[in-house]
Every structure is written in structure tokens, then in C-alpha cells.
Amino acid sequence: MPFRSTWLWAIALAAVVVLFATGCPAANAPPAELDDRTDALQLTPYLSYLHDKRAVDSADEAWRLIAAGRFERVPNGKTAFGFQEGAYWFHAKVVNQNPDEPYWMLVQSFALLDRVDVYLRYPDGHIVQHASGDSLPFSARSISYRHPNFRIALPPGEAVDLLVRTQSQSSMQVPLELYTPAAFTSLSRDAQFVMGVYYGILLALFVYNLVLWITLRDASYFWYLFHISAFGLVLFTLNGYSFEHLWPNSPWLANVAVPLSICLAIVGMQQFSRNFLELPKRFPRGNIVSLCVIAVCVALGVAALWLPYRIATPWATRAVIVSVLWTVTVAIVVLRRGYMPARLFLVAWAVFLTGAAMIAALAFGLLPKNMMTEYGVQIGSALEMLLLSIALSYRYASLRNENERIAAEANLQLERKVAQRTQEVRSTLMQLEDAHRRLRDSSRRDGLTGLYNRTHFHENFELLLKESREQKQPLSLLMIDLDHFKSINDKYGHLAGDDCLRWAAQRIGQSLRVHETSLLARFGGEEFVAVLPGHDLRSAVSVAESVRKRLVEELCSSGEHRLRVSASIGVHTVEPEADIDSDAALSVADQALYSAKANGRDCVRTSITAA
């Protein structure tokens, strides 16, 4: 009886587990909230997803499935699914609580997805669509950057539905992140710096070993150079730089370059191993296997020109794992047979094995995408190539007499000093460049208000006029003059006047920021000038009115005084067909400004009403 009772309880418990596992819907993902303290946000915790295995669902069908609760939470907090057929849909609700950042950058931080479609549904029901991916020309991206990116509008205080569809023959990795424009700029700069350091190391090693190969004519150095070049091309392609810089208008090459570069890197790896470890003499059977691996990779590389990407790339990725493991195996065998240079060779490949295993596991969805898995292969390969370079020097030294060994060590020390000095020079040049940039920007700024000065305005206004004509769009000019400013200086002093100028500049800038003003400058004294590209006269007058009202909404504080500051504004619109230069446009806007002052101040007048 107790035995039977125990089984009954076990069956009941299993039934409850099955009921909850099958009958309860997945919990809805929480909305992603952006506030003024948020510069960047990973969307994975806020995503729900649906695998459209036949890739037939439209956006309308996806919206319907979201409403029906068919989307599920992202499993295990990972958006890496490995090589999968069909399309993946992702949904998140985003609420922007930062009034100063109405535009954000949505970045899909994996360079090899074929197609990424983004749909934004706003509270009023209208939907905005964007598209990117390496099946489209590189110019389709919002900003020229190695990862697909989208500049999206997130009106403050509104809940926006974000729907993303991804489809690719490559590994399905969809790390979605939101950045402010400033944070995105910092991200791209840091990524460029990391890759610049990495390729700087490769270039230094390449040049150094190229000199040794030309001098010594040792085949190991040639295959080492081949391996460096091919593997550098692999990472250049996997990180999206090849598509950005080498063939931005060829999605076909962007796809073919991945398996082809991997196959070239494996050929270089095996050939270098055969020569360095002297396999024909020390391990003949292993040499035959290595030649077979090379033949298979050559055939796969040629076939990749015709094979579908979804077939060639997974096989090339598997070949990387097999090739690295085989290389480590033959190194162990040769080391056990007494060949001491294989010891350092084995250490180098052990380091590379870690990085290569990370990127392969990431491609098949076995590891999450993070800083270590994303850049682990760069770190591992850089250390591996540095160690292989040292191993080559050690191998050559072991074949020569003591004097040649000392000379080789001296060359190695010279290499390290050159690398150190190169890094110091690079750091100094970066500091000088930063100082020059800050000095140049400071010379174009007004010292009191922080706005651009008159010189900078004249240099750029003519360019904006030219662009408006080329784009066949109107361009509007606002001349803003603070009313009764002289009386403020006379009555309260120049320090109060300075406070009023700074206060007014801040309010004008805040009012114009939402209108994407291309140019705002202090024109002189209490006068400011702003350029509104793409604004006709009617919209420019509306902007001018918002500036005027913003100034009189509250009083300016200066010490113990509370001062009312208003402005007269003249508006002039330059039509794209108008034959007018910058000085003439300023003169017409100035006439409109004088008309506003003549009509009682604290008002807006246009060049038409002034005439």
C-alpha cells in the first residue's frame, strides 16, 4: 500500500508539471525603459521571439501572433541560435523617458546576418520600416558601420512596439542593443581602436617575418605569412570590415568571403605546421593526413563559390575545429618524439584553440555573445601568432651555432623594442590629434555662450546653401535679436547682461534641438543666427514662434535680479532655385529682423512681411 501510494503521488506530480509546462503561456517580457541615465541598453531581457521555420509570415501576421500571445521569452537569455533555417521574429516594447534623446541607434551586433527588417509601431498606429543586412548594399545602413544599424525615432513618453525580423544562411546571432547617438559614437570608436591594435600587431609580425623570409628563404616563414594574411582576412570578414571597406556593393562577395577566407586560413595553418614540425621526416603518416585536410579545404573553398552559404559556412566552421585539433595532435606526437621546438608551437596553438573554439561555439549557439566570446578569437590569435613568431625564431636558432642563436635573440629583443616604441608613438600621436581637435573646436566657439562664432557660421552657411540647392530643398534662416539688451546692461551691469546672453543661448538651443538645426551661432552682441535646412517659410515661422515663446515663458536669474528677456526674430527662406549667396540671404533676414523691431519687438516677421 505505501509503495502504491508513492507511485500515485509521483504520477500526480508529473501531471502537474506537464500541465504547467504545456498549458501555461510564457510570461510576457517587461517593457524596455530608457531614462536620462541610460546610454546603452541590451534588449535581450526584454525580447520575446517566434521562429518562423518556413519564413512565410508577414509583418501583419507577426503583429497578430504577438497579440495572440504566440511569442515566447528568449530561451536562457541568449539570442544565439546557431545555424537555423527560416526566419526569427523578435518583439519588445520600448518606452523612452528621456526628453533629450528623441532618436536612438538600434544596433544588431553581428555582421553576417543576410537580412534584418525593423518595424516600429507608434501609439497612433503608423508603422515605420527599416532594412539592412549583408544581402543589401552597405549604403543601405543608417550609419557607415560594420554592424547593421538603424536610426529610430522614440518619442519621449510614448510606448513604441519594436518588431525585428532576421533571416540568414549564416549563424543566427541576434544581439540587439539600443544606444544614444553619443554612446554609439563611443562604441564605434572603441571597436575601431581594438581592431586597429589587433591589425597593427599582425602588420608588425608580417613585416618582421617577411624580412626574415626574404633573408633566410625558409618555407616555414612563407607559410607563416600566408597564415597571418589569411586569418587576418577571416576576422576582417567576420567582423564586417570587408563588406564595409572592400566590397560594399557586392553582397555575393560578402557571403562567399566567409567560407573562402576560412578555407585559406586552414590551408596556411596546415602547411605551416607541416614545415615547422618537419612532418614528412618526423611523422610521415600524420603528414599524409595533413595533406588530406589541405585537399579537402581547397575543394571546399572552390565549392564555396557555388555552394549555398548555409552549407559552405557551417562546414568551413567544422573544418576549423577539426584542423586545430589535428594540429595540436601532431604537435604532441612530434614533441613526444624529442623535437623540442614543438613545445612552444604547442603552447601557441593551445592559446589559439581557446579563441577558435569560442567563435565556433558562438556560431552554433553554444555560448552567449559577450565581450570575451566576441573578441576572444582576436586575443587568442594575436597571442598565437606572436608565440609562433617566437617559435620560428627558436626553431631557426636551434639549427644554427651559438653565435647565430645570440643574433636571433637580439632580433627578437629589437622586435619587442620596435613594438614598444610604435605603441608609444601611436599613443603620442593620438594625444596630439585629440589636443588639435579640441583646440580647433575651441577656436570656433563663442567664449561666453559656448555656441559657434560668426567665423564658423560664415564658413559653413555657404556649404549649407549649396547642399540645399543640390537636394532641391528650401533652407530657412532665423535672425534673433534680444530686445532692450542695452537697457539691461545699463541698468543691471554687464555681468547681468552676460547672464542673459548665456541664458538666452541655452533656451534657443533647447528650442531648436528638436528641429534638427544644422547651424546655430552667436552672430555678435545680442544677435543669434540659426539655419533650418529643409524648412519652408511656414515651418520656419512656427519654429521661430516656439523660440520666442520659450524665451518669455520664464524670467532670467542674475544674482538677486529676475529679468524678462524677449527677442525679435526675422525669418527668411531661400528656395532651392534662388540665385543668392550667403551675404544676400543674411541681409534679407536682417531686414525682416528690423521689421520685427519696428513692429513693437517680441514678435516674428518674415522677409515677405518686411517687404
Image (cartoon, grey):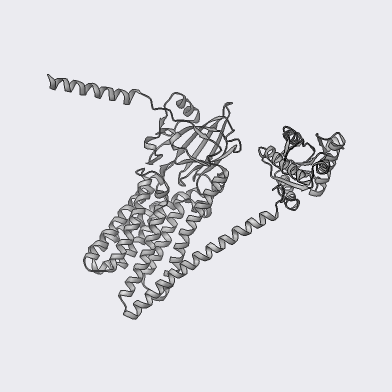
Q: Residue at x 36, y 60 (%)?
A: 267
Residue 311's x, y, as percent? Answer: 37, 46
In the displayed structure image, the side of residue 295 where residue 533 appears, left or right = right
Q: Position of residue 399 (x, y in %)?
A: 30, 76
- Percent position (x, y) of residue 342? 28, 66
Label count reads 0
Image x and y of residue 570, in percent: 80, 39
Observer-nearest of 290 and 366: 366
The answer to whether residue 472 is seen in the rendering is no
Is 187 left or right of 337, judged from the image as shown?
Answer: right
Residue situated furthest left in the rendering: 1
- Quadrant in the picture for residue 198: bottom left
In this view, 371 is above or below 227? above
For the question of whether residue 56 can be seen, the reply is yes
Quadrant (top left, top right, bottom left, bottom right) of the C terminus: top right
Pick out the residue farthest to the front.
560
Quick one: quadrant of the N terminus? top left
Q: Nearer the viewer, residue 559 or 23?
A: 559
State the residue at coordinates (53%, 62%): 427
Name the residue: 46% across, 44% down.
113
> Could you say which quadrant of the image residue 160 lies in?
top right
